[in-house]
Image (cartoon, rainbow, N blue to C red):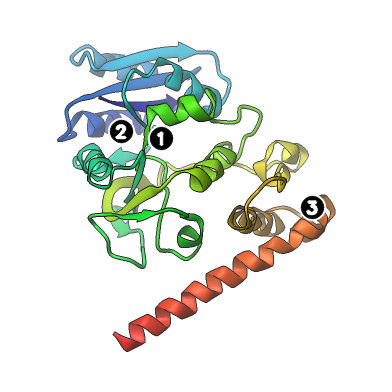
Amino acid sequence: MISVIIPLYNKERAIRNTVESVLKQTFKEFELIIIDDGSTDNSADIVKEIAVNDNRIHYYYKPNGGVSTARNFGLSKAKGEWIIFLDADDEMLPINLEHLYTLANRHNVQIVAGNVMIKRNNYLEKSQLILDKPDGKVYKNIIPSIIGGEAIFPNGAVLINHNIFNLEKRKPYNETLFRYEDAEFELNLFRKYPIAVSSKPIHIIHSEFAELSKLNEKKCDKDFIFNLDFKEKTFWQKIYLGRFIMEGCSSYNNGFYKMKKKYGLNYYWRYLYLLVRKYYSIKHSFLRLIQ
């Protein structure tokens, strides 16, 4: 069985479509766990109305504590062998769970990821992956491939075996952070486990509902960008952390100064990150020319 976990907070405009997209899955062996993180709108009423007719839906309420607390709480309630987290304003295509489950069995791995599409003004845009691998490709080190645009690890299209959460930590999402609360956990997954990635679109991100995490200069200490830990990291993990330094430079006021002051010599991993991106860009441009 697959456990689909939705953290919910004030998404009355989107939650019906999101829940119904799960119920339309061609793969039927799933439970849908919805963690209401203290919503104050009509989100709960909508979920309860749908749940009356489907006993696979399990609704839980908790006081507001942030998306990380909701995801961790949902994981504690999950009974499935496989776990997938879904944002309350996104949408699964009907083939989502079946495709991911098939990939996991085909490649005999514990983590699989599919591709996404983004909906803007009623127009669907396919995420552009350089490699067209609808049947999936296994990466033993996925980080350079993510940086180079060959692979993707998107929320809502990633299936993880429940045993991994038990082995790594019972609360994978950092409840002290308000941005990139899953980044450290994912970095650990990238280092330790082979991951199969498919270019087949199985998930829709609705840009009209998407709310980017708001930057708060006074609370930057709660942003993963200001909590990067380079100790005991592999070469490729450090390069991937350079991505967050680069974002910090552009996202915050006086970002270059703040990042350099915070990280010292580790600040320069951002340049290696940019070099890897440039290398892949040149590599794939060359391959297209000779094909």
* Residue 124 in view (yes/no): yes
Of the residues under marks 2 and 3, which one precedes in the sequence? 2
Residue lying farthest to the bottom in this orientation: 290
Q: Which mark identifies residue 87?
A: 1
* Residue 254 in view (yes/no): no
Q: CA distance from mark 3 to mark 1?
A: 32 Å
For discs 2 and 3, the disc positioned in front in the rendered view: 3
Name the amino acid, label 1: Asp
Residue at 19% in and 42% down: 95
Contact between marks 1 and 2 (CB within 8 A): the answer is yes
Q: CA distance from mark 2 to mark 3?
A: 40 Å
Q: In the picture, residue 34 is in which quadrant? A: top left
Relative side of 138 to 70, left or right? left
Q: x%, y% of residue 210?
A: 45, 43
Residue at 58% in and 21% down: 65
Q: Nearer the viewer, residue 279 or 115?
A: 279
* Residue that numbered label 2 is attached to: 18
Name the amino acid, label 3: Tyr
| Element assignment for label 3 | helix
Q: In the picture, residue 232 is in which quadrant? A: top right
Circle 2 Cα neighbour tier, 10 Å, few/some/many (<14 / 14–19 / ≥20): many
Q: Nearer the viewer, residue 209 or 238?
A: 238
Circle 3 Cα neighbour tier, 10 Å, few/some/many (<14 / 14–19 / ≥20): some
Q: Which mark identifies residue 263?
A: 3
